[in-house]
Image (tube, grey):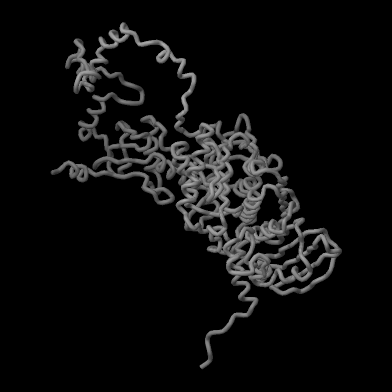
């Protein structure tokens, strides 16, 4: 019998290994930008065509490479950063394992042009399928220009798994932004299909933060700065008003390397506890500088997940640093043990407490309540008080337009069975005369034919809107023209995303047109949406759409419908009138699937009479 185990050919092994590092064009962008930074570049230019599928090119003015280094750079695990195993735990550069260029060369056609300042001529290297096909001496500028063309040309199955151009460009912009934030002193530019997207001059950390977050953050950032023997934390957190419904604008860097850490995100969120709503997320750009021996960055192929020697210490430092920064800028409450000089000028301190004032105070009933033993709870009885007064209080309550009086509501409850307030069938078929109760401005309590139901107003409205938007594809939703059209200025990535979903938004009732580079004008909104908040509504929709998560691969339209329903639904905490509550229950009852939201959360719970009676049995 022949042997069944054999060694894979090098080109197949390289393609498999490349899959761990190069998953999409953005992966190559990250590796090439980091290599340019490691080369000491002060100017880095990124050019992409067809969202990186056709071309990713990085041009830098770094130190360049010799002819021999230019060829060896594409070999597996070729590196200038590591000589011994100990070096692996003292890394301060971005790249070090030597797998990036080798992985890129395994799945794309690569061209390299490089020259050192000391050399008269540079070197050009052409590589395909991990093999050097041509090496020539050329005249070129100092630094390195590397082009990755036709990603996954030799692995068509993997190319088919790439997303749309707008989705892939969004990932490229994310990686570009992270590297640019880590090295603000370096000039960065990004061009897509020949058009300039970003142009960021080198400067301070705050200048780069403003370039990334936008000019509106100029006065909305709070500086964070704490230094200890163990670590240093610097950066910025956004003031509470910058908090968003999604986890955008959140960046953590350890030794200038972007990382993903839910643990540290939790530390920052805890520091904002009580300052922002629980469903919101703070904005921040934080840099942690720590001894490399205290960090293991070799736990993930992309090096975006790291392990600290002592996670709890890092957590405590991050939380304390953010809290301190917020307190210093009078954003969070803090204890100040220094005495304000102005307090000394108050009358209570300056004017003496005379005997006359003391006698006057002692004659008050309030004084007796705090001086007699066991009398702190005592309230003197008024001569005019009587039981009849209490009876009159409850029987003369005024009625309002939206609510019934206490005794009227009681009569509805007592006489419900004889007055026929309930309809047969669904528990959502509530008679229009029934008095509803809103609990905590979140839950609607309504009588049913066999007990009562409790409805979550936000989730119920989400289900109603979701089904309405689903049916809009067959019957487009009505649009109301805006009397004063609103101009919407977006970032490049958001503008690309809006262009992708603009046709689907039209079916729902939004009339939006392009209005110059990265600008749009909102000409109309859905007929049943109140005017005046169009800009915020679209911006929030884009945020939710970008960060939509789910285990199932939903279509673009399905994601949009779910985001729209979530955004436009009445929120928990909003007061509703009797008429509005009845209308919501009626609309929910007309839904095809009224009992759950699109994500599976229940919209209402029914408490039947047998269950209610059981609660009060012995």
Give the residue drawn at x 46%, y 33%.
334
> Measured from the top left, where is residue 355 in percent x and y?
31, 7
Q: Is residue 388 above or below residue 133?
A: above
The answer to whether residue 584 is left or right of residue 171 is left
- Farthest residue, direction top: 356
Quadrant in which residue 12 is drawn: bottom right
Q: How many marks?
A: 0
| Relative to 67, residue 326 above or below | above
Which quadrant of the rendered structure holds the C terminus?
Answer: top left
Q: Residue 363, relative to residue 38: is it above or below? A: above
Q: Position of residue 145 (x, y in %)?
A: 76, 60
Q: Nearer the viewer, residue 602 or 189?
A: 189
**Residue drawn at (53%, 38%), measured in percent from left and top?**
325
Residue 35 shows in the view: yes
Q: Is residue 249 visible?
A: no
Residue lying at 51% horizontally and 50% vertically, measured from the top left: 548
- Report the front residue among 339 and 485: 339
- The foreground one among 312 and 8 is 312
Image-quadrant location for residue 541: top right
Instruction: Classify residue 167 as left or right of residue 612.
Output: right
When the figure is inspected, residue 21 is found, relative to residue 276, above or below; the finding is: below
Q: Residue furthest left?
A: 618
Residue beneath the point at 29% across and 8% down: 360
How far from the left and from the top, in percent, is residue 594? 38, 46
User: Residue 120, percent across and down?
Assistant: 86, 63
């Amino acid at each position: 019998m022949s042997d069944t185990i054999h060694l894979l050919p090098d080109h197949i092994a390289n393609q498999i290994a490349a899959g761990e590092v190069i998953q999409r064009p953005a992966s190559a962008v990250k590796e090439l930008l980091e290599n340019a930074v490691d080369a000491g570049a002060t100017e880095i230019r990124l050019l992409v065509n067809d969202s990186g599928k056709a071309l990713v090119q990085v041009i830098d003015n770094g130190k360049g490479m010799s002819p021999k280094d230019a060829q060896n750079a594409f070999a597996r695990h070729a590196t200038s950063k590591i000589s011994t195993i100990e070096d692996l735990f003292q890394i301060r550069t971005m790249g070090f394992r030597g797998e990036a260029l080798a992985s890129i060369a395994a799945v794309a056609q690569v061209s390299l042009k490089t020259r050192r300042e000391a050399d008269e001529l540079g070197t050009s290297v052409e590589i395909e399928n991990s093999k050097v096909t041509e090496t020539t001496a050329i005249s070129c500028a100092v630094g390195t220009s590397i082009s990755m063309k036709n990603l996954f040309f030799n692995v068509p199955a993997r190319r088919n798994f790439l997303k749309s151009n707008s989705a892939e460009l969004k990932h490229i912009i994310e990686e570009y932004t992270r590297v640019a934030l880590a090295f603000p002193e370096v000039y960065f530019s990004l061009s897509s299909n020949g058009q300039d997207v970003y142009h960021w001059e080198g400067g301070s950390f705050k200048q780069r933060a403003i370039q990334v977050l936008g000019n509106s953050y100029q006065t909305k950032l709070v500086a964070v700065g704490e230094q200890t023997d163990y670590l240093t934390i610097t950066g910025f957190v956004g003031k509470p008003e910058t908090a968003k419904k999604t986890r955008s604008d959140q960046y953590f860097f350890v030794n200038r390397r972007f990382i993903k850490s839910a643990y540290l995100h939790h530390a920052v969120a805890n520091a904002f506890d009580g300052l922002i709503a629980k469903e919101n997320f703070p904005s921040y750009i934080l840099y942690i500088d720590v001894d490399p021996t205290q960090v293991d960055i070799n736990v993930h192929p992309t090096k975006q997940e790291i392990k600290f020697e002592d996670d709890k210490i890092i957590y405590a430092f991050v939380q304390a640093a953010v809290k301190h920064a917020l307190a210093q800028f009078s954003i969070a409450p803090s204890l100040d043990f220094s005495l304000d000089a102005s307090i000394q000028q108050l009358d209570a301190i300056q004017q003496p407490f005379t005997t006359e004032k003391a006698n006057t105070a002692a004659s008050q009933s309030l004084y007796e309540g705090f001086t007699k033993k066991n009398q702190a709870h005592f309230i003197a009885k008024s001569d005019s008080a009587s039981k009849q007064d209490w009876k009159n209080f409850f029987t003369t309550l005024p009625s309002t337009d939206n609510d019934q009086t206490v005794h009227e509501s009681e009569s509805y409850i007592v006489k419900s069975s004889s007055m026929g307030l309930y309809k047969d069938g669904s528990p959502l078929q509530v008679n229009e005369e029934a008095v509803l109760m809103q609990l905590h401005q979140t839950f609607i309590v309504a009588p049913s034919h066999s007990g009562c139901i409790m409805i979550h107003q936000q989730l119920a409205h989400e289900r109603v809107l979701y089904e309405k938007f689903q049916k809009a594809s067959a019957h487009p939703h009505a649009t109301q023209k805006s009397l004063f059209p609103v101009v919407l200025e977006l970032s490049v990535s958001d503008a690309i995303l809006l262009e992708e979903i603009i046709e689907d938004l039209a079916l729902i009732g939004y009339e939006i047109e392009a209005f110059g580079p990265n600008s749009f004008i909102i000409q109309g909104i859905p007929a049943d949406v109140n005017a005046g908040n169009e800009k915020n509504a679209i911006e929030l929709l884009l945020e939710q759409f970008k960060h939509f998560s789910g285990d199932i691969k939903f279509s673009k339209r399905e994601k949009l419908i779910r985001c729209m329903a979530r955004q436009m639904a009445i929120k928990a905490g909003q007061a509703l009138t009797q008429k509005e509550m009845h209308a919501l229950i009626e609309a929910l009852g007309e839904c095809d699937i009224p009992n759950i939201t699109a994500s599976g959360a229940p919209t209402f719970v029914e408490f039947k009479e047998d269950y209610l009676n059981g609660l009060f049995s012995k």
